[in-house]
Amino acid sequence: MKIVRSREELRSELETPRRAGKRIGLVPTMGYFHEGHLSLMRRARRDCDVVVVSLFVNPTQFGPGEDLDAYPRDEDRDAELAELQGVDLLWMPDGEQMYPEGFATVVEVGNSLTGVLEGDPAHRGPSHFRGVTTVVAKLFNSVQPHVAYFGRKDAQQAVVIRRMAEDLDFPVEIEVLPTVREDDGLALSSRNAYLTGEQREQAAAISRALRAAEQAAAAGETSTDALVAAARSELRNSGIDPEYVEARAAEDLTPIAKLNGRPVLLAVAARVGRARLIDNVVITPREA
Ligand code: AMP
């Protein structure tokens, strides 16, 4: 595996394989790898000739007062783990390279996808996604991958990025892979590193809440309000007061009142200790 820091180096490494018609896969990350990241790398390794992982803790997607400075980092460990998955190129640009002086452009996907599910608007919502889409557009332009891999754990992010790629004619396939979880259901996240032992226990209630909603749907419940209530009740029992629990159409995040055969995204954001955790399930009921 080669570690590259500059865009020039990255492009020159990719020139020969690109000319030879090799399939290039990109896994964008903010580092501090866990099995969720590694599952994306392994899939890329399986399906592509050249696997590029980008590691950049993108300041523009953090809100004021969010955890940018505290965000966990361990480049050496990340490099080892990426190499073990057979990654070819680990690209770790610095802030100066991504946002040089005079940088003045943003890529913004419309409010119907970025202004929903925001919970506390001081923390998330459009400005967060503006940071995400701007940086991902830059990563796509720098790597020019044939395919890019994202996790379902960040379901709204995946919907927003798909929209951007389609709207701006990025010639890239977007692959969204399943959420990797701990044994007790907690979705893996770099931010789980913030949890104390007790909070770690408490955090497991988030996936239990989603499972409770899933079970209610499997038992025949079709009202999304009732599914949300089932999830909220599980959270309440564990002392978690969520920023949001919402049911939305999985493809376009429009509100949805009844399960009607379309896949429904049930998404939760909740603060546990210092960590703001998100998780979701997609419920696909049988045709009514
Ligand atoms: P991050 O480093 O948190 O920005 O995540 C990089 C990529 O890994 C994103 O596409 C995430 O959706 C994905 N990812 C994060 N956690 C998980 C997980 N538990 N399972 C699967 N993918 C994940």
Image (cartoon, helix red, strand yellow):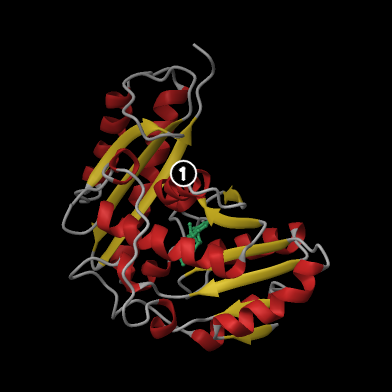
Is 263 on the left-hand or right-hand side of 216?
Answer: right
Q: Position of residue 136 (x, y in %)?
A: 47, 62
Which one is nearer the viewer's eye here, 205 or 259? Answer: 259
Residue sitting at x 18%, y 70%: 65
In which quadrant of the rendered image does the N terminus lie? bottom right
Quarter-of-image position of residue 8: bottom right
Per the image, label 1 sits on a secondary structure element best described as helix
Residue sitting at x 31%, y 69%: 104
Residue 210 makes an appearance in the image: yes
Is 14 on the left-hand or right-hand side of 56?
Answer: right
Q: Position of residue 198 (x, y in %)?
A: 29, 66
Which residue is the extreme one toward the right? 20
Which one is nearer the viewer's eye here, 43 or 268? Answer: 43
Count the labels in the image.
1
Mark 1 Cα within 10 Å, few/some/many (few <14, many 20+)?
A: some
Tell me the amino acid under the disc marked 1.
Answer: Arg
Q: Which residue is mark 1?
A: 163
Which one is nearer the viewer's eye here, 154 or 198? Answer: 154
Above or below 93: residue 105: above
Quarter-of-image position of residue 146: bottom right
Above or below 114: residue 203: below
